[in-house]
Amino acid sequence: MNEWGIALIAAGAAILGSAVTGFFAWKAGHRQAAAAETAGQAQAAALISTVQATLDEQRRARADERRRETYAAFLTAADQWQKERPIGDGKEVFAAFGLIEIEGPHEVIVAAGLYQQAVHRFVHAEIRHMNDVLTSRTAYVHTVHEVLNEG
């Protein structure tokens, strides 16, 4: 074979070697890019999950605080109504009870209703002893503690 033929074969082999090497480098680059994309998506999903959990916790804390304020306002209004008897009309108690009906849950609504009824009966002299009032107040406070400490 002459020198030109050998040079041509060598040049062809070099070009073919470069093409094959380039192809495999290109494939490896695509695999790395796909792996980096998958890792980035997993990291983004973890970050979104963390942010969502934080927002959910903040939302729950705000709801708990709003409930706590509502429950305390009802307790304060009922206590005040009881002390003002017989001159108090109890409208603050009924307004606070309405907020409790909105906030819930059912067991607090029931306990607040029983406490409100006991205070109403005491204010209007339907009962003379504080036992019913104190018992229903204690039950209300206990129920509120249970509900607020569930979460």
Image (cartoon, rainbow, N blue to C red):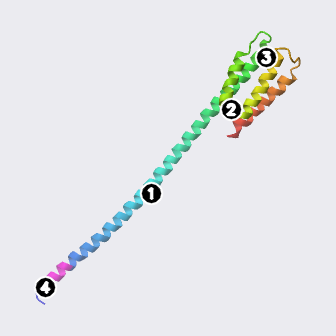
* Residue bounds of the magenta highlight: 5-12
Disc 3 crowd rating (10 Å Cα; few below 14, some 14-19, many 20+) is many
**Distance from label 4 to label 1 (Cα)?**
50 Å
Nearest to viewer (mark 3 / mark 2): 2
The residue that label 3 is drawn on is 82
Q: Residue at x 58, y 36 (%)?
A: 59
> Could you say which quadrant of the image residue 31 lies in?
bottom left
Quadrant placement of the C terminus: top right
Quadrant placement of the N terminus: bottom left
**Distance from label 4 to label 2 (Cα)?**
93 Å
Nearest to viewer (mark 2 / mark 1): 2
Q: Going from the N terminus, do you reach mark 3 or mark 4 first?
A: 4
Q: Please, what is the three-letter code of the amino acid marked with disc 3?
A: Gln
Q: Residue at x 83, y 24 (%)?
A: 134
Residue 11 covered by magenta stretch: yes
**Distance from label 2 to label 1 (Cα)?**
44 Å
Q: Position of residue 132 (x, y in %)?
A: 85, 24
Disc 2 crowd rating (10 Å Cα; few below 14, some 14-19, many 20+) is some
The residue that label 1 is drawn on is 39
Q: Mark 2 near mark 1, Cβ–Cβ under 8 Å?
A: no
Nearest to viewer (mark 3 / mark 4): 3
Residue 83 covered by magenta stretch: no
The residue that label 4 is drawn on is 5
Tell me: 23 left or right of 127: left
Q: Secondary structure at mark 3?
A: helix
